[in-house]
Image (tube, coloured by chain):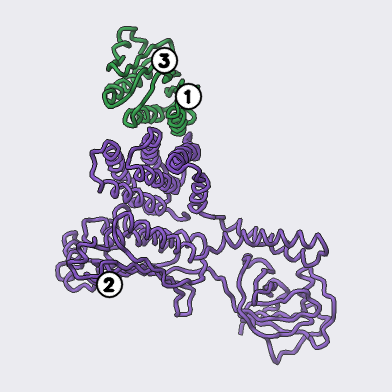
């Protein structure tokens, strides 16, 4: 399935005031940007967003998803669990349909340093961390 | 684990562990948000502890290790009344997810692309930070590494152990022929090698038991139960690493079950007019029946097994007819508790282990060459007995004095000193020169020594310039395989060479 167009993609975007998630598809690369505080208010929407992203990426033959977390000041463990769920789903996709995840993080954020490196341990061949 | 457990046990482990992971995650969130009862903390501890033991038993050591770290992290969180930095919350949550992923994998192997060591490192970093924030200046890192060392089994496969033992023996004998600084260096190398062999071949049972005594005290404290934990005897026994793991696993489950399920809460004990402080006795002893078995017993004075309930369940499940159940002895009913899945059922006993259950404990113990039984009296308590083979750390030997030998020589006592046999001439090729075979050079001739005959069954070996000077018991300090000519042993703390005469020139008598 080919790129379904900007309007269909934008329907996945999430904004709950304190937290937003956007995505942009560019050929075989997808750019995700998370901003704000991912707390309980963002939980369900984040799950829906990541499920949608996974489907969209597979439908469009995406090879890499770049996730920008630099503007995320807080992420609850429940929201983080959704990220782990996403990584687990990607792991389960057989090659060559599997895409890589490149996470852009903030070096100055302790929680990001610790948790993202730990997240990388779930799938070292899939995830790269940039800071 | 050399022999895989039955697939049904692995499946049950996965199912019960997945449930525990989910319960721990829910309880953890509730505790952090202040919604959960404090009893939920005990539930988390219990589940992590059970998961740790089950995982080790069924061959998921990486899950066991992770649980151990999460127990540490949980302790820190509890000490801080669950007011923890977000990194602690994240690592605890991720740790549980990591476990959920690992348990679905093949036992004993992390899935491809998974970096368990890296994850543990991150977890340790968070643990150190959390501890240091509570107790600045305390060397938390040292404590973590120590715990890690304790958890890591010291395993070498049999071939590697044999090779190492053989190499160490050669180094020892070489040192005997060397002089000066070379001799010193070789002796140092021998000491290092033989200690490694010893650690890898014969694990002290007392070390394992003492660890569980400490764990039992901690568990009873965390479950708010007043329990006097007693280690009755120090056995001095050693076991192979394989048996050590089985003993460790059995202890983990039996002790946990006794404290968690067997020993009643203080209120119940008071109502039954029992001593407020419960007793848990762990005993290790060598069995007296002359074989190589030892026994480990775990006794508690708790509520005991509800035998009527066991009878009822046995009938309900079609295992026994009503008549057979009525007539069954408690020993026979005790056997049922080791049947697959029986002990994990809703049996109100002190052995109603949660998770993989007593059947898996039995399999693990039997795989190690041991056995397990239960005795129980309602309201008086339960005794679980585990028999296991101990390492052949001692051997009866015959001491030989060989002319010019720089070292005492011994042979196993299965070799008898022959009598009334026509001796071959000293220069007969049948007469063996032990020192020559060992590569040791004799210095002097022994005037009263003559050729000695060693016999075992139909085997005959003549040893040159040798006499029998008595019998003794030797301690094995660096085992070598039976295919090797020599092994270094200790008799009265003195190093001796145990020679296996069958590898010298043996004359075999014809069958009658």
Chain letter for the part of the structure drawn in purple: B
Q: In the drawing, does residue B366 fall left or right of residue B500?
A: left
- The label number, if any, that marks residue A108 in the structure image: 1
Of the numbered discs 3 and 1, the one sitting upstream in the chain is 3
Q: CA distance from mark 3 to mark 1?
A: 25 Å
Q: Is residue A62 left or right of residue B223?
A: right
Residue at the spot x=34%, y=22% of the render?
A: A37
User: To which residue does mark 2 refer?
Assistant: B331
State whether discs 3 and 1 lie on one chain: yes
Which residue is at a point 66% across and 79% down the rendered structure image?
B459
- What letter labels the chain drawn in green? A
| Chain on which label 1 sits | A
Give the image quarter of residue A6: top left
Q: Quadrant of residue B85?
A: top left
* Residue furthest to the bottom: B420
The answer to whether residue B320 of the structure is visible from this angle is: no
Furthest residue toward left: B322
Give the CA separation, mark 3 to mark 2. 66 Å
């Amino acid at each position: 399935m080919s790129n379904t167009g900007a309007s269909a993609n934008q329907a996945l975007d999430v904004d709950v005031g304190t937290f937003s998630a956007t995505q942009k598809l560019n050929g075989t690369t997808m750019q995700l940007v998370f901003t704000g505080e991912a707390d309980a208010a963002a939980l369900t929407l984040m799950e829906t967003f990541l499920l949608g992203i996974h489907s969209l990426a597979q439908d469009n033959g995406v090879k890499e998803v770049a996730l920008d977390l630099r503007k995320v000041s807080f992420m609850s463990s429940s929201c983080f669990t959704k990220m782990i769920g996403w990584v687990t789903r990607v792991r389960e996709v057989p090659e060559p349909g599997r895409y890589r995840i490149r996470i852009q993080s903030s070096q100055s954020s302790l929680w990001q340093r610790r948790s993202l490196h730990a997240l990388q341990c779930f799938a070292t061949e899939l995830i790269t961390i940039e800071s | 684990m050399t022999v895989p457990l039955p697939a049904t046990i692995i499946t049950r482990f996965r199912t019960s562990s997945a449930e525990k992971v989910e319960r721990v995650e829910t309880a953890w969130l509730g505790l952090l948000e202040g919604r959960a009862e404090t009893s939920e903390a005990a539930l988390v501890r219990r589940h992590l502890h059970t998961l740790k033991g089950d995982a080790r038993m069924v061959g998921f050591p990486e899950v066991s290790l992770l649980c151990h770290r999460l127990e540490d992290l949980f302790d820190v969180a509890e000490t801080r009344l669950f007011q923890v930095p977000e990194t602690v919350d994240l690592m605890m949550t991720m740790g549980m997810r990591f476990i959920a992923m690992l348990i679905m994998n093949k036992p004993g192997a992390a899935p491809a692309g998974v970096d368990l060591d890296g994850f543990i490192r991150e977890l340790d970093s968070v643990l150190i930070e959390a501890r240091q924030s509570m107790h600045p200046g305390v060397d938390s890192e040292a404590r973590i590494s120590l715990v890690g060392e304790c958890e890591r089994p010291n395993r070498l496969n049999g071939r590697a152990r044999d090779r190492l033992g053989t190499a160490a023996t050669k180094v020892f004998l070489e040192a005997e022929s060397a002089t000066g600084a070379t001799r010193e260096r070789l002796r140092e190398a021998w000491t290092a090698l033989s200690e490694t062999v010893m650690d890898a071949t014969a694990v002290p049972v007392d070390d394992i038991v003492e660890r569980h005594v400490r764990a039992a005290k901690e568990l009873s404290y965390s479950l708010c139960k007043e329990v006097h934990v007693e280690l009755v005897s120090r056995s001095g026994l050693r076991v192979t690493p394989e048996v050590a793991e089985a003993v460790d696993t059995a202890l983990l489950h039996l002790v946990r079950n006794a404290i968690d399920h067997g020993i009643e809460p203080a209120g119940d004990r008071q109502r039954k007019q029992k001593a407020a402080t419960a007793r848990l006795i762990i005993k290790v002893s060598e069995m007296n029946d002359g074989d190589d078995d030892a026994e480990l017993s775990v006794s508690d004075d708790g509520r005991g097994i509800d035998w009527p309930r066991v009878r009822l369940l046995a009938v309900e499940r079609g295992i026994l007819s009503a008549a057979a159940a009525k007539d069954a002895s408690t020993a026979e009913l005790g056997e049922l508790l080791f049947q697959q899945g029986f002990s994990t059922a809703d049996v109100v006993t002190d052995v109603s282990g949660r998770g993989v259950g007593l059947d898996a404990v039995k399999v693990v113990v039997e795989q190690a060459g041991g056995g397990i039984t239960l005795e129980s009296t309602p309201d008086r308590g339960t005794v679980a007995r585990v028999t296991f083979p101990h390492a052949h750390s001692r051997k009866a030997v015959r001491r030989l004095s060989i002319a010019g030998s720089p070292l005492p020589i011994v042979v196993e006592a299965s070799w008898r000193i022959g009598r009334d046999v026509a001796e071959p001439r000293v220069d007969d090729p049948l007469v063996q020169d032990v020192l020559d075979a060992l590569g040791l050079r004799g210095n002097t001739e022994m005037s009263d020594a003559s050729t000695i005959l060693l016999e075992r069954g139909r085997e005959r070996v003549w040893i040159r310039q040798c006499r029998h000077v008595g019998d003794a018991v030797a301690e094995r300090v660096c085992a070598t395989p039976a295919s090797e000519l020599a092994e270094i042993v200790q008799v009265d703390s003195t190093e001796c060479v145990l020679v296996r005469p069958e590898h010298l020139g043996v004359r075999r008598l014809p069958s009658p």
